[in-house]
Image (cartoon, rainbow, N blue to C red):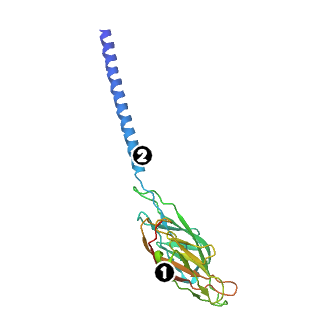
Amino acid sequence: MKSKRVNKLTSKRGREATLLCRALRTWSLVTCYLSLLIACMEDAKVTQSIAFGEIAPQQLRDGFLPLEATASSGLPVFFVSGDTSIAVVEGDAVRFLKAGATTITACQPGNERYYEAPQVTRQLLIRDWNPNKKTQTVQFELPNEWRLSKDGTIVSLSATASSGLPVTYTLSATSYGFLSANGRYLYLYHAGEGGVAAEAYNAHISVTASQPGDEEYNPADNVTEVIHVIGDVFH
């Protein structure tokens, strides 16, 4: 009798061990499948980038500045001020609190389809107005349309300030071109360069002329010109 009980107990424990092993094997397979599924979902994500142009110097008396940036994913872009004692972000605009320099960073955190975009940071310089200084103005014009196949890839910039002080330029869309080191020329990309699409592109690019003033002159009001660029030159 005792031997039968031992055999039954041994058999029962053997079955339990077998069931436990099967359960562990099943759990291992499920865990492995889930891990592979998560890895596949991660691999299915797509990278994205942010287009956020340089910010021209601003005047405190203007109060605020609308911010424009786009993500290649089409997802909304968010902005962050580097120094909230100088300027604060309110939605898609930045409000000026005092004169000084800070940064504005454009962010896009991604979602289940897109990875987080690399952040783009631009400097924001805010200048005050002094009633004891002289005023000045900036004269600046650009052609309405620029076709690369006909006009070339270099646009000459020739703004002047009534004070005679040098003028600086800011480009809104750095994916379509860049400013020369001396600030006198706008170099436009051929189709397929600088992050633009490989096919011909059709873009409106803003260039802002600024004069920040000195010990004698107040800053001049910025002058922004928009040029319609048709990128129809290929490699």
Q: CA distance from mark 2 to mark 1?
A: 46 Å
Quadrant placement of the N terminus: top left
Residue 39, labelled with which disc?
A: 2
Q: Quadrant of residue 131?
A: bottom right
Q: Nearer the viewer, residue 222 or 198?
A: 198
Q: Quadrant of residue 199?
A: bottom left
Does the image show residue 56? no
At label 1, which amino acid type do we have? Val
Kindly identify the residue that appears in the image at 36 percent across and 35 percent down: 29
Tell me if 12 is positioned left or right of 214 in this view: left
Single out the mark in the foreground, 2 or 1. Answer: 1
Mark 2: amino acid: Ala
Q: Is residue 74 above or below residue 125?
A: above
Neighbours of disc 1 within 10 Å: few (<14), some (14-19), many (20+): some
Residue that carries the numbered disc 1 in the rendered image: 226
Residue drawn at (34%, 33%) of the image: 26
Q: Residue furthest right?
A: 215
**Front residue (pair 62, 73):** 73
Q: Position of residue 74 (x, y in %)?
A: 40, 65
Residue 95 screen position, x and y as percent? 53, 76
- Numbered label tally: 2
Is the residue 224 above or below the residue 12 in the image? below
> Considering the numbered disc 2 on the image, is that residue within a helix, a strand or a loop?
helix
